Amino acid sequence: MTAPDIKPDETVDARGAACPGPLMDLIGKIRSVDSGAVVALYSDNDQSHTDVPEWAEEAGNDLLAVEERDDHSVFYVEKA
C-alpha cells in the first residue's frame, strides 16, 4: 500500500513542534482511536523518522507508509 492510497481516519498536524512533541501528539491520538484506525502524523521534525518507527514497533502498531512532502513528512500509523 502506498501513501496516496491510504485514507487516514484521523490526522495530527505537529509541524513546528520540537522533539518529542510530534511523537507525543501521535501517541495521544492513537490512544483515542479504535483498533484498525489509521492516524496520519504531519511532522517537519527530522527526529520523527527515528522516533515514530521505533515507537510503532515497540507499541505493536503498524507504520504503513512515510510520505515525503516539500516541507514535512507524513507518517501513516495503524493502531493494532
Image (tube, rainbow, N blue to C red):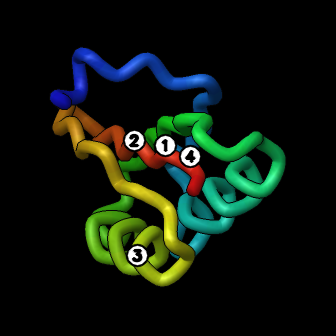
Question: Which mark is nearer the camera, 1 or 2?
Answer: 2
**Could you tell me how far apart the alpha carbons at marks 3 and 1 are, in whole angstroms?**
16 Å
Residue matched to label 1: 41
Residue 33: horizontal and vertical position, in percent? 76, 41
The answer to which of 62 and 19 lies nearer the viewer is 62
Secondary structure under the numbered disc 4 in the rendered image: loop
Q: CA distance from mark 4 to mark 3?
A: 21 Å
Q: Determine which residue is flagged by label 3.
A: 57
Tag 1, which secondary structure?
Answer: strand
Type of the residue with mark 2: Tyr
Tag nearer the camera, 4 or 2: 2
Which residue position holds label 2? 76
First-in-chain label (4 vs 2) = 4
In this view, the residue in front, 27 or 63, is 63
Q: Identify the mark at residue 14; answer none if there is no mark.
A: 4
The answer to whether the residues at label 1 and label 4 have Cβ atoms under 8 Å apart is: yes
Q: Secondary structure at mark 3?
A: helix
Amino acid bearing label 1: Leu
Residue drawn at (37%, 79%) of the image? 54
Say which label, 3 or 1, has the lower sequence index. Answer: 1
Residue at 67% over, 56% down: 25
Residue at 45% from the left image edge and 48% from the top image edge: 77
Q: Which callout, 4 or 3, points at the residue further toward the start of the chain?
A: 4
Quadrant of the rendered image containing residue 11: top right
Residue 21 against residue 10 in the figure, above or below: below
Q: Earlier in the sequence, mark 3 or mark 2?
A: 3
Mark 1 vs mark 4: which is more N-terminal?
4
